Image (cartoon, rainbow, N blue to C red):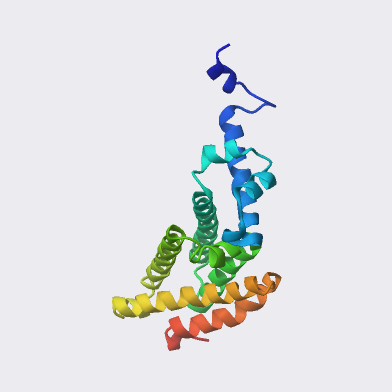
Amino acid sequence: MSTAAAAGRPYAGKGLADRRSEQRERILMAARDVFATRRYGGAAVEDIVARARVSRTTFYMFFENKEQCLLAVHRVGLERIGTAVIAAAARSAEQGLAPPALIRAEVRAVLGAYAEDPAMARILLIEIVGATPAAERAHVRARGVAASIIQARLEQYSFWRRRSPAHRRIASLATMAAIGEAIGDLVTTGRISEWESLVGPLSEFIGRALIDPKDLP
């Protein structure tokens, strides 16, 4: 049997592609935990591979270096938050919620998504910031995308369609910052389990900033 054929041979019922996918996932989740506990500067590839139970060779099969691994972890976290936001928006649309209830439902969804994985929340909100120039660029891009998503939501609301693009952009950035700073404070102080306590006050704060006064309860 050729080496190539042997490499693709199923092992424990799994083919090579499945095994590689599982290895990559283990590395990413191990890196998430290591970066969250040791910070980027204090983390080493050796720490990641030990936690993932893979070899250094396997690590470098997927990632050129520690920085590329951090960026991959960051992308995974953003995808998870994005999925939660999209699902919440779809539910809100189906239910035809009034603006105050809509904001509350989506704030709950975003906070809950962060709280579901505290280590990943730390990566997305704290550790990515300034870790490396590439990490900072990824962080800035993510902020821009998040603000654009909020802005698109505002443009569905007649009150904000009448405002200028500059007004909508500032409101979107401020909303994103309010959510990020609020949950980031819980992450840094080790109180992420208290996330539900933020839903009410944060929703009210954002609502008063974004909702036409005549639509407020």
Lateral position of residue 197 relative to residue 134, left or right? right
- What percent of the width, then of the height, locates residue 27? 61, 45
Nearest the eye: 84 or 140 = 140
Q: Residue furthest top?
A: 1
Task: Name which residue lies at 53% across and 59% down.
Answer: 87
Question: For this rendering, which residue is in front, 97 or 124?
Answer: 124
Residue plotted at (45% across, 84% down): 209
Whether residue 158 can be seen here: no
Taking 20 as reference, is 125 above or below it? below
**Residue 7 vertical position relative to residue 191 in the rendered view, above or below:** above
Image quadrant in which you'd find residue 210: bottom left
- Return the residue nearer the eye: 37 or 17: 37
When the figure is inspected, residue 23 is found, relative to residue 124, above or below; the finding is above
Closer to the camera in the image, 118 or 102: 118
The structure residue drawn at horizontal position 56% and vertical position 31%, both measured from the top left corner, is: 17
Q: Quadrant of residue 39?
A: bottom right
Q: Residue 56: in sight, yes or no?
A: yes
x%, y% of residue 1? 58, 11
In this rendering, the count of numbered labels is 0
